[in-house]
Image: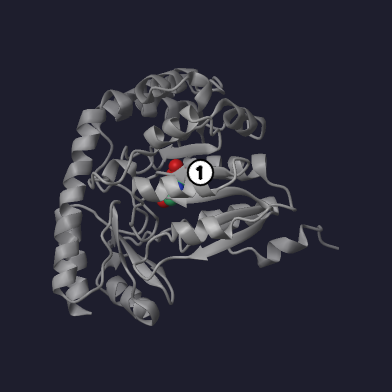
Amino acid sequence: MSVRTRADLAALPGYVPGRSIPGAVKLASNEVSLGPLPSVVAAVAEAAGRINRYPDSGAGELVARLAAKLGVTEAQVSVGCGSVTLCQQLVQATCTADDDVLFGWRSFEAYPIITQVVGAGQTRVPLTADQALDIDAMAAAVTGKTRLAFVCTPNNPTGTALTKPELDRFFDAVPEDVLVVIDEAYREFVDDPSVPDGVEVAKEQWARGRDNVAVLRTFSKAYGLAGLRVGYLVAPDAVTDAVRKVFVPFGVNALAQVAALASLDAEDELLARCRDIVAERARVRAALLELGYTVPVSQANFVWLPLGERTAAFNEHCLENKVVVRAFAGDGARVTIGTPEENDLFLAAAKSF
Ligand SMILES: *Cc1c(COP(=O)(O)O)cnc(C)c1O
C-alpha cells in the first residue's frame, strides 16, 4: 500500500525553472548576470559566523528600513522567502476552495500553481493582441467568488506595463472586498514615465479609504539576490496581519536579511546596473525588430518574442547556439537581458534562426 496524497495534485503542473546548462549563457530566469557586489558578499560572509542562531522571524530591521524608504508604517510591510512565497501566503490568507483567484494569462506561471495548491479556483483572462494585460476584461471577469486579483506589471513574461489610468479604472471597477495585488517584481527596470510606482498608487487608494490594494516586490531581480530568497509585501495592516498568520516561522533566513540590508545600503550602485540593463534592453529590442521579430515594448529585464508555433524550434536553435532562453511552447520565448556579450550571443542566434 502506498501513502494517500491529495488526488488533485496529479493535475498540478510543476513549476518549470529556467534551465542551467554548463557552458551555455543562461538568459532564462530574469536574473541579473553580474555577480553580487563585494559589499553584499562581505556582509553575508560576516553574518555566516552567526548561523547557529535562528534569524529574526519578523525581519524587524529590514522591515523598518523598507518602511522608512517607502513612506509607509512598519505594520504595512511584511517580508517573505521570496515574493513567490508571499504570493502563496496571500492566496492562503484570502481563499478557500470556494473562492477564486483572478489573473491575466499569460502571466507569472507561479500564480496558477499556487492557486491550485491552496485548492482555490482560478479565472485566467487572455492578454490583448499586443501581449498586454487586458485590464478592462479582468475587471469584467470579477465574480462574487473572486477574492484576489494578481496584476503583474511589468508583466512576466511579456514585459508590458500598465499606465496609471488603467490601474485606476481597475481599482474603481473592483469591489472593495477583493484584494488587488500589484506584482512589481520588475519595478526597478521601468523607464516609461507613464508607468506609475505601485506603492504610490496603493497609498493613493488607501488615502481614499480603499484598503484592498497591495504591492509585491523582490530582492531577486534588480537587487541580484535570487539565490537568497527575500521579497516584500506593502499592504494595509489587515492584509499584512492575515499574511503573517499563514507564514512559516523563520522563513526569511539570516543571510537573506543581512544581504537585503546591505543591498539597500548599496542601492545607488545596484540601480545604476539596472539602468545599464535598460539601455541593453533597448539595443536588443531594436536589433530584434530589425531582424523582423515582433517584440512588445518591455519595461522589465527581459524581452518577449510571441513566436507561437515556432517557439519550440526557436528554443532548440538557441540551445544549439549555447543560449538558454525560457520557452513557453506554442506561445512565445522570454529572453532575459544579460551583459552586452551575452546579449550579442543571443542576437547572433536570433539572426541565424
Ligand atoms: C521573479 C518573480 C517573482 C518572484 O520572485 P522571488 O524570487 O520569489 O522574490 C514574483 N513575481 C514575478 C512576476 C516574478 O517574475
Q: Amino acid at mark 1?
A: Val
Viewer-proximal residue, 238 or 295? Answer: 238
Q: Is the CB atom of the residue marked by disc 1 within 8 angstroms of ligand 1's nearest atom?
A: no
Residue drawn at (15%, 55%) of the image:
340
Q: Using the rendered view, name the quadrant where residue 346 is placed.
A: bottom left
Report if residue 195 is visible in the image: yes
**Tell me, what colour scheme is on the image?**
one colour
Residue drawn at (49%, 31%) of the image:
208
Q: Is residue 114 left or right of residue 309?
A: right
Instruction: Residue 23 in the image: state x and y as whole percent.
Output: 27, 61
Viewer-proximal residue, 141 or 226? Answer: 141
Q: Is residue 137 left or right of residue 218?
A: right
Viewer-proximal residue, 6 or 20? Answer: 6
Q: Which residue is most to the right? A: 1
Instruction: Residue 335 in the image: state x and y as whole percent.
Output: 30, 62
- In terms of secondary structure, where does tag 1 sit? strand
Q: Using the rendered view, name the quadrant where residue 183 is placed.
A: top left
Residue drawn at (44%, 35%) of the image:
202
Q: Is residue 147 above or below residue 347?
A: above
Instruction: Residue 283 in the image: state x and y as whole percent.
Output: 14, 59
In the rendered view of the protein, which quadrant contains the N terminus?
A: bottom right
Q: From the image, tell me which residue sits under label 1.
A: 181
Q: Using the rendered view, name the quadrant where residue 189 is placed.
A: top left
Q: Is residue 342 left or right of residue 65?
A: left
Q: In this figure, what is the number of numbered marks? A: 1
Instruction: Residue 178 in the image: state x and y as whole percent.
Output: 60, 44
Q: Is residue 54 above or below residue 248?
A: above
In the rendered view of the protein, which quadrant contains the C terminus?
A: bottom left
Report if residue 16 is visible in the image: no
